[in-house]
Image: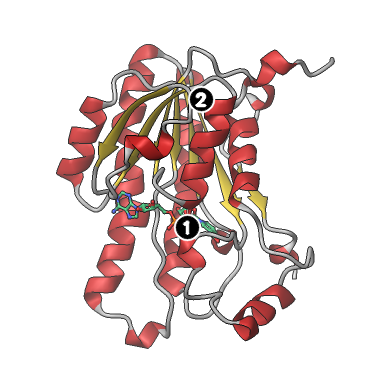
Amino acid sequence: MKIETKDLDFSGKRVLITGAASGIGAEMAKTFSEHGASLILADITKIQKDDYKRLSGLVKTIQFDQADPTSIAKMSTEVGRVDVLLNNAGVVWMGPFEEMSDLDINRLIAINLVGHITVAQKIGRSMLEQRSGVIINTSSQLAFHGAAERAVYAATKAGVSQFTKSIAAEWASKGVRVAGIAPGRTLTALNKNALDTHSKRNIALQGIPAGRFAEAHEMAKLALLLSSDLLNYVVGETIISDGGYVLL
Ligand SMILES: NC(=O)c1ccc[n+]([C@@H]2O[C@H](COP(=O)([O-])OP(=O)(O)OC[C@H]3O[C@@H](n4cnc5c(N)ncnc54)[C@H](O)[C@@H]3O)[C@@H](O)[C@H]2O)c1
């Protein structure tokens, strides 16, 4: 069966993107806008509507803190109907694990795992009521591959992928499809310190068979395809897009 342009048309769909102020989330906003979606953009950073003025379909921007359950609850009442949730906000902490403070450990888990799960639950409840919706969780290649100096980050992302499988199994029969994307090293602010010298970039590249880092728009396109009806039989999987990193 031929794939038609309309298969990737999100007109009439309200898409909530968390972590939309920068990096992969900002590219998701652009890509989904180009495919007709109505956008609700949420982030801890105040999103300046002016920055997104060129995007068609911007409905609203919301400031919230994924580390704070009260803030998540407030955000989820402000969003209105959501057809697609791109559950994408996240942070990283890099360095020797033995030097990580309790505060750093707890904050990383609070944002990347507890907050992520809470967002999915709050938005998912409304999707269950409307008996339709798609949730795409942003995991990481490190859910599938160990990495020195990112132990707790990797643990949170493995948690995200396992969570993805389990709620997908629970909600698929109730009209809500859940899946995930696992980006490889993508050129965003998240990697600014990790890739800020020539030698750090060269070492990182040695682990990537494709020989390059990913661009944020590549992850946005993956999220678009995965949340479209074209892939509506993909349930619970986290799709890895990492230039082959996990193969080595
Ligand atoms: N860049 C990579 O190499 C890479 C690789 C694998 C997975 N990821 C994941 O992709 C997602 C997006 O990351 P990115 O690379 O675009 O990084 P980024 O830093 O450019 O974007 C992350 C966004 O999340 C927001 N955010 C951070 N803490 C928040 C909080 N407490 N509440 C609400 N929003 C908050 C930030 O303000 C920012 O806009 C993250 O979940 C990250 O773990 C990134």
Tell me whether circle 2 and circle 1 mark residues in contact (CB < 8 Å). Answer: no
Q: Residue at x 58, y 27 (%)?
A: 34
Q: CA distance from mark 2 to mark 1?
A: 22 Å
Quarter of the image for residue 155 reads bottom left
Residue 32 is situated, as x and y percent measured from the top left of the image, at 54, 29
* Numbered disc 1: secondary structure: helix
**Ligand 1 within 8 Å of the CB at mark 1:** yes
* Numbered disc 2: secondary structure: helix
Residue type highlighted by circle 2: Ala
Residue 93 is situated, as x and y percent measured from the top left of the image, at 39, 71
Which quarter of the frame holds ligand 1? Answer: bottom left
Mark on residue 157? 1
Q: Residues within 10 Å of mark 1 (few under 14, many from 20)?
A: many
Q: Residue at x 48, y 31 (%)?
A: 54
Residue type highlighted by circle 1: Lys
Image: 146 above or below 244: below
Residue 4 is situated, as x and y percent measured from the top left of the image, at 76, 15
Q: Residue at x 42, y 60 (%)?
A: 156
Mark on residue 172? 2
Q: Nearer the viewer, mark 2 or mark 1?
A: 1
